[in-house]
Amino acid sequence: MKKRFSKELIIGGLVLLALLILVFGINYLKGVNMFKPSNYYFATYTDVAGLAQSAPVTVNGFKVGLVREISYEYDNPGHIKVEMSLDRHLKLPRGTKAMLTTDMLGTSSIALEMAPGKDFHNVGDQLIGANASGLMSSVTNDLMPSITAILPKIDSILTSMTTIVSDPALLASVQRLDKIMANIETSSAQLNTTMKAMPRIANDASGLMTDLKTISADLTALSAKLREMPIDSTMNSVNSIAARLNTSMEKLNSKDSSLGLLLNDTGLYNNLNASAASLDSLLKDVKQNPKRYISIKVF
Protein backbone atom coordinates (compact mmCIF):
# COMPACT_ATOMS: atom_id res chain seq x y z
CA MET A 1 0.00 0.00 0.00
CA LYS A 2 2.82 2.35 0.83
CA LYS A 3 4.56 1.56 -2.41
CA ARG A 4 1.37 2.27 -4.44
CA PHE A 5 0.96 5.66 -2.73
CA SER A 6 4.49 6.58 -3.65
CA LYS A 7 3.83 5.96 -7.36
CA GLU A 8 0.74 8.15 -7.29
CA LEU A 9 2.63 10.87 -5.52
CA ILE A 10 5.35 10.72 -8.12
CA ILE A 11 2.84 10.86 -10.97
CA GLY A 12 1.04 13.80 -9.36
CA GLY A 13 4.31 15.64 -8.90
CA LEU A 14 5.24 15.08 -12.54
CA VAL A 15 1.86 16.32 -13.72
CA LEU A 16 2.15 19.42 -11.54
CA LEU A 17 5.64 20.07 -12.87
CA ALA A 18 4.40 19.66 -16.43
CA LEU A 19 1.60 22.15 -15.77
CA LEU A 20 4.04 24.63 -14.31
CA ILE A 21 6.33 24.24 -17.29
CA LEU A 22 3.35 24.70 -19.61
CA VAL A 23 2.25 27.89 -17.84
CA PHE A 24 5.73 29.33 -17.85
CA GLY A 25 6.20 28.27 -21.48
CA ILE A 26 2.98 29.93 -22.61
CA ASN A 27 3.83 33.11 -20.77
CA TYR A 28 7.34 33.04 -22.16
CA LEU A 29 6.00 32.72 -25.67
CA LYS A 30 3.72 35.67 -24.94
CA GLY A 31 6.71 37.67 -23.77
CA VAL A 32 5.63 37.68 -20.14
CA ASN A 33 8.47 37.39 -17.67
CA MET A 34 6.79 36.05 -14.52
CA PHE A 35 9.94 36.54 -12.46
CA LYS A 36 10.38 40.18 -13.40
CA PRO A 37 8.41 42.64 -11.26
CA SER A 38 6.34 45.17 -13.21
CA ASN A 39 3.90 48.06 -12.73
CA TYR A 40 0.42 48.22 -14.20
CA TYR A 41 -1.22 51.15 -15.99
CA PHE A 42 -4.47 51.48 -17.89
CA ALA A 43 -5.71 53.27 -21.00
CA THR A 44 -9.12 53.43 -22.67
CA TYR A 45 -9.77 53.30 -26.45
CA THR A 46 -12.76 53.30 -28.74
CA ASP A 47 -11.11 51.03 -31.31
CA VAL A 48 -8.48 48.38 -30.60
CA ALA A 49 -8.53 46.58 -33.96
CA GLY A 50 -5.36 44.51 -34.38
CA LEU A 51 -4.37 44.80 -30.70
CA ALA A 52 -3.87 41.54 -28.82
CA GLN A 53 -2.59 40.44 -25.45
CA SER A 54 1.21 40.46 -25.19
CA ALA A 55 1.38 43.20 -27.83
CA PRO A 56 4.50 45.32 -27.21
CA VAL A 57 4.46 48.68 -25.44
CA THR A 58 7.33 50.90 -26.57
CA VAL A 59 8.94 54.24 -25.84
CA ASN A 60 10.73 55.71 -28.86
CA GLY A 61 10.78 52.24 -30.42
CA PHE A 62 12.25 50.52 -27.32
CA LYS A 63 10.11 47.81 -25.71
CA VAL A 64 9.32 48.68 -22.09
CA GLY A 65 6.37 46.35 -21.50
CA LEU A 66 3.42 44.59 -23.03
CA VAL A 67 -0.35 44.50 -23.09
CA ARG A 68 -1.51 42.45 -20.12
CA GLU A 69 -5.25 42.36 -20.63
CA ILE A 70 -7.97 43.81 -22.89
CA SER A 71 -11.51 44.14 -21.55
CA TYR A 72 -14.73 45.86 -22.59
CA GLU A 73 -16.12 48.53 -20.25
CA TYR A 74 -19.76 47.60 -19.95
CA ASP A 75 -20.48 50.56 -17.68
CA ASN A 76 -18.95 52.88 -20.34
CA PRO A 77 -20.33 51.62 -23.67
CA GLY A 78 -18.10 51.98 -26.71
CA HIS A 79 -14.85 51.98 -24.73
CA ILE A 80 -12.27 49.22 -24.24
CA LYS A 81 -9.86 49.18 -21.33
CA VAL A 82 -6.32 48.02 -21.93
CA GLU A 83 -4.09 46.99 -19.07
CA MET A 84 -0.36 47.47 -19.62
CA SER A 85 2.45 45.78 -17.73
CA LEU A 86 5.48 48.08 -17.75
CA ASP A 87 8.99 47.92 -16.39
CA ARG A 88 8.83 48.93 -12.71
CA HIS A 89 11.79 51.28 -13.19
CA LEU A 90 9.87 53.27 -15.82
CA LYS A 91 8.35 56.53 -14.59
CA LEU A 92 5.56 58.13 -16.59
CA PRO A 93 5.13 61.93 -16.36
CA ARG A 94 1.57 63.13 -16.09
CA GLY A 95 0.14 63.83 -19.51
CA THR A 96 1.85 60.83 -21.11
CA LYS A 97 -0.19 59.42 -24.00
CA ALA A 98 -0.60 55.76 -24.87
CA MET A 99 -0.88 55.91 -28.70
CA LEU A 100 -2.36 52.87 -30.42
CA THR A 101 -0.52 52.36 -33.74
CA THR A 102 -1.14 49.86 -36.56
CA ASP A 103 1.45 48.62 -39.03
CA MET A 104 0.95 47.59 -42.67
CA LEU A 105 0.07 44.03 -41.69
CA GLY A 106 -2.73 45.23 -39.42
CA THR A 107 -0.91 44.39 -36.19
CA SER A 108 -1.34 47.00 -33.46
CA SER A 109 0.93 48.04 -30.63
CA ILE A 110 1.08 50.84 -28.06
CA ALA A 111 3.66 53.60 -28.21
CA LEU A 112 4.06 55.84 -25.15
CA GLU A 113 4.55 59.54 -25.85
CA MET A 114 6.22 60.97 -22.78
CA ALA A 115 5.04 64.35 -21.57
CA PRO A 116 7.55 66.90 -20.18
CA GLY A 117 7.72 67.46 -16.45
CA LYS A 118 8.70 65.64 -13.33
CA ASP A 119 5.24 65.05 -11.86
CA PHE A 120 4.87 61.31 -12.41
CA HIS A 121 1.88 58.97 -12.50
CA ASN A 122 1.26 56.56 -9.70
CA VAL A 123 1.18 52.85 -10.39
CA GLY A 124 -2.29 51.82 -11.60
CA ASP A 125 -3.19 55.30 -12.95
CA GLN A 126 -5.24 55.87 -16.09
CA LEU A 127 -3.19 57.12 -19.06
CA ILE A 128 -4.51 59.13 -21.99
CA GLY A 129 -5.40 56.64 -24.72
CA ALA A 130 -5.50 57.76 -28.39
CA ASN A 131 -5.42 56.16 -31.82
CA ALA A 132 -2.49 57.28 -33.94
CA SER A 133 -3.08 57.98 -37.61
CA GLY A 134 -0.94 55.15 -38.87
CA LEU A 135 -0.40 53.97 -42.40
CA MET A 136 -3.44 51.71 -42.47
CA SER A 137 -5.75 54.41 -41.19
CA SER A 138 -4.35 56.83 -43.75
CA VAL A 139 -5.00 54.28 -46.47
CA THR A 140 -8.49 53.65 -45.20
CA ASN A 141 -9.44 57.27 -44.69
CA ASP A 142 -7.58 58.98 -47.53
CA LEU A 143 -6.88 56.50 -50.29
CA MET A 144 -9.99 54.34 -50.21
CA PRO A 145 -12.34 57.13 -51.36
CA SER A 146 -9.98 57.92 -54.22
CA ILE A 147 -9.68 54.25 -55.13
CA THR A 148 -13.47 53.89 -55.04
CA ALA A 149 -13.79 56.86 -57.39
CA ILE A 150 -11.13 55.49 -59.74
CA LEU A 151 -12.58 51.97 -60.00
CA PRO A 152 -15.31 52.91 -62.59
CA LYS A 153 -12.65 54.61 -64.71
CA ILE A 154 -10.43 51.54 -64.47
CA ASP A 155 -13.37 49.38 -65.55
CA SER A 156 -13.96 51.68 -68.53
CA ILE A 157 -10.28 51.54 -69.46
CA LEU A 158 -10.29 47.73 -69.26
CA THR A 159 -13.37 47.62 -71.50
CA SER A 160 -11.67 49.90 -74.03
CA MET A 161 -8.51 47.79 -73.92
CA THR A 162 -10.56 44.64 -74.54
CA THR A 163 -12.16 46.31 -77.56
CA ILE A 164 -8.77 47.42 -78.87
CA VAL A 165 -7.17 44.01 -78.35
CA SER A 166 -10.02 42.27 -80.20
CA ASP A 167 -9.74 44.70 -83.14
CA PRO A 168 -8.48 42.91 -86.34
CA ALA A 169 -6.53 46.01 -87.25
CA LEU A 170 -4.42 45.53 -84.13
CA LEU A 171 -3.63 41.98 -85.17
CA ALA A 172 -2.56 43.24 -88.60
CA SER A 173 -0.41 45.88 -86.93
CA VAL A 174 1.19 43.23 -84.76
CA GLN A 175 1.92 41.13 -87.84
CA ARG A 176 3.47 44.15 -89.55
CA LEU A 177 5.47 44.77 -86.42
CA ASP A 178 6.73 41.18 -86.59
CA LYS A 179 7.86 41.80 -90.17
CA ILE A 180 9.56 45.02 -89.14
CA MET A 181 11.35 43.21 -86.32
CA ALA A 182 12.45 40.51 -88.79
CA ASN A 183 13.80 43.21 -91.12
CA ILE A 184 15.57 44.83 -88.18
CA GLU A 185 17.16 41.49 -87.30
CA THR A 186 18.30 41.07 -90.94
CA SER A 187 19.69 44.60 -90.97
CA SER A 188 21.42 43.91 -87.67
CA ALA A 189 23.05 40.79 -89.13
CA GLN A 190 24.21 42.78 -92.16
CA LEU A 191 25.51 45.47 -89.88
CA ASN A 192 27.43 42.86 -87.90
CA THR A 193 28.94 41.57 -91.15
CA THR A 194 29.90 45.11 -92.11
CA MET A 195 31.41 45.73 -88.71
CA LYS A 196 33.48 42.55 -89.06
CA ALA A 197 34.77 43.87 -92.42
CA MET A 198 35.67 47.23 -90.92
CA PRO A 199 39.28 46.21 -90.01
CA ARG A 200 39.96 45.26 -93.63
CA ILE A 201 38.34 48.48 -94.85
CA ALA A 202 40.42 50.40 -92.33
CA ASN A 203 43.59 48.75 -93.64
CA ASP A 204 42.64 49.63 -97.23
CA ALA A 205 41.90 53.18 -96.16
CA SER A 206 45.28 53.32 -94.44
CA GLY A 207 47.01 52.22 -97.66
CA LEU A 208 45.02 54.78 -99.64
CA MET A 209 46.04 57.50 -97.21
CA THR A 210 49.67 56.45 -97.65
CA ASP A 211 49.32 56.73 -101.45
CA LEU A 212 47.64 60.12 -101.08
CA LYS A 213 50.49 61.31 -98.89
CA THR A 214 53.01 60.16 -101.53
CA ILE A 215 51.08 61.95 -104.30
CA SER A 216 50.85 65.06 -102.16
CA ALA A 217 54.60 64.97 -101.57
CA ASP A 218 55.22 64.62 -105.36
CA LEU A 219 52.88 67.53 -106.08
CA THR A 220 54.70 69.61 -103.49
CA ALA A 221 58.05 68.83 -105.12
CA LEU A 222 56.65 69.64 -108.60
CA SER A 223 55.26 72.91 -107.33
CA ALA A 224 58.66 73.78 -105.86
CA LYS A 225 60.37 73.03 -109.20
CA LEU A 226 57.80 75.14 -111.05
CA ARG A 227 58.47 77.99 -108.67
CA GLU A 228 62.21 77.65 -109.39
CA MET A 229 61.72 77.92 -113.19
CA PRO A 230 62.28 81.43 -114.78
CA ILE A 231 58.69 81.78 -115.84
CA ASP A 232 58.75 85.59 -115.70
CA SER A 233 61.73 85.93 -118.10
CA THR A 234 60.23 83.34 -120.45
CA MET A 235 56.94 85.20 -120.52
CA ASN A 236 58.81 88.48 -121.19
CA SER A 237 60.59 86.86 -124.16
CA VAL A 238 57.31 85.51 -125.50
CA ASN A 239 55.70 88.93 -125.12
CA SER A 240 58.69 90.55 -126.93
CA ILE A 241 58.46 88.07 -129.82
CA ALA A 242 54.72 88.64 -130.04
CA ALA A 243 55.29 92.41 -130.17
CA ARG A 244 57.84 91.99 -132.98
CA LEU A 245 55.45 89.79 -134.94
CA ASN A 246 52.73 92.39 -134.52
CA THR A 247 55.12 95.08 -135.82
CA SER A 248 56.09 92.95 -138.84
CA MET A 249 52.46 92.22 -139.63
CA GLU A 250 51.67 95.91 -139.45
CA LYS A 251 54.52 96.65 -141.89
CA LEU A 252 53.26 93.97 -144.26
CA ASN A 253 49.80 95.45 -144.17
CA SER A 254 51.16 98.99 -144.67
CA LYS A 255 51.76 100.50 -148.17
CA ASP A 256 54.75 102.45 -146.95
CA SER A 257 57.17 99.54 -147.29
CA SER A 258 58.13 97.84 -150.53
CA LEU A 259 56.88 94.45 -149.44
CA GLY A 260 53.68 96.00 -148.17
CA LEU A 261 53.28 97.92 -151.41
CA LEU A 262 53.85 94.75 -153.39
CA LEU A 263 51.28 92.87 -151.33
CA ASN A 264 48.67 95.61 -151.13
CA ASP A 265 48.97 97.53 -154.52
CA THR A 266 46.74 95.76 -157.06
CA GLY A 267 47.96 97.78 -160.07
CA LEU A 268 51.59 96.98 -159.38
CA TYR A 269 50.62 93.35 -159.01
CA ASN A 270 48.84 93.43 -162.40
CA ASN A 271 51.79 95.19 -164.09
CA LEU A 272 54.15 92.60 -162.73
CA ASN A 273 51.90 89.85 -164.06
CA ALA A 274 51.76 91.55 -167.50
CA SER A 275 55.52 92.02 -167.55
CA ALA A 276 56.03 88.41 -166.63
CA ALA A 277 53.66 87.36 -169.40
CA SER A 278 55.44 89.57 -171.99
CA LEU A 279 58.82 88.22 -170.88
CA ASP A 280 57.54 84.69 -171.20
CA SER A 281 56.22 85.40 -174.71
CA LEU A 282 59.56 86.98 -175.70
CA LEU A 283 61.49 83.99 -174.46
CA LYS A 284 59.28 81.66 -176.42
CA ASP A 285 59.74 83.72 -179.59
CA VAL A 286 63.52 83.80 -179.07
CA LYS A 287 63.53 80.04 -178.80
CA GLN A 288 61.44 79.69 -181.96
CA ASN A 289 63.15 82.38 -184.09
CA PRO A 290 66.62 82.92 -182.78
CA LYS A 291 67.85 84.26 -186.14
CA ARG A 292 65.52 87.16 -185.77
CA TYR A 293 67.38 88.38 -182.78
CA ILE A 294 70.88 87.02 -183.36
CA SER A 295 72.70 87.64 -186.73
CA ILE A 296 75.86 85.67 -187.43
CA LYS A 297 78.24 86.92 -190.18
CA VAL A 298 81.00 84.79 -191.60
CA PHE A 299 84.03 86.49 -193.05
Image (tube, rainbow, N blue to C red):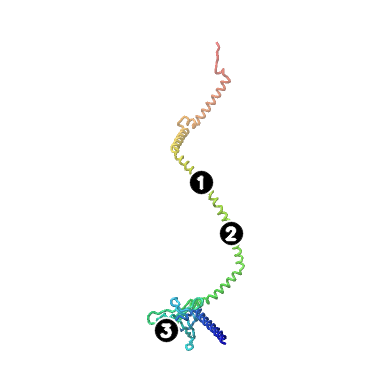
Name the side, left or right, on which 131 lies relative to 6: left
Q: Earlier in the sequence, mark 2 or mark 1?
A: 2
Crowding at label 3, few (<14), some or many (≥20) Cα neighbours within 10 Å? some
**Residue at point 54% right, 51% down?**
199
Disc number placed over residue 232 in the picture, else none: none
Residue that carries the numbered disc 2 in the rendered image? 185
The quarter of the picture where the N terminus appears is: bottom right
Q: Earlier in the sequence, mark 3 or mark 2?
A: 3
**Residue at point 48% right, 43% down?**
217
The reply to whether discs 1 and 3 touch (Cβ–Cβ < 8 Å) is no
Mark nearest the camera among 3 and 2 is 3
Residue situated in front as seen by the camera: 155 or 290: 155
Residue situated in front as seen by the camera: 153 or 74: 74
User: From the viewer's perspective, is residue 118 above or below residue 182?
Assistant: below
Mark nearest the camera among 1 and 3 is 3
User: From the viewer's perspective, is residue 236 above or below residue 129?
Assistant: above
Residue that carries the numbered disc 1 in the rendered image? 210
**Residue at point 60% right, 69% down?**
165
Residue situated in front as seen by the camera: 280 or 3: 3
Provide residue 18's location: percent of width, then percent of height: 53, 81
Disc number placed over residue 123 in the picture, else none: 3
User: What count of labels does the image hold?
Assistant: 3
Three-letter amino acid code at the position of disc 3 = Val
Crowding at label 1, few (<14), some or many (≥20) Cα neighbours within 10 Å? few
The quarter of the picture where the C terminus appears is: top right
One can see residue 134 in this view: yes
Residue 187 lies in quadrant: bottom right
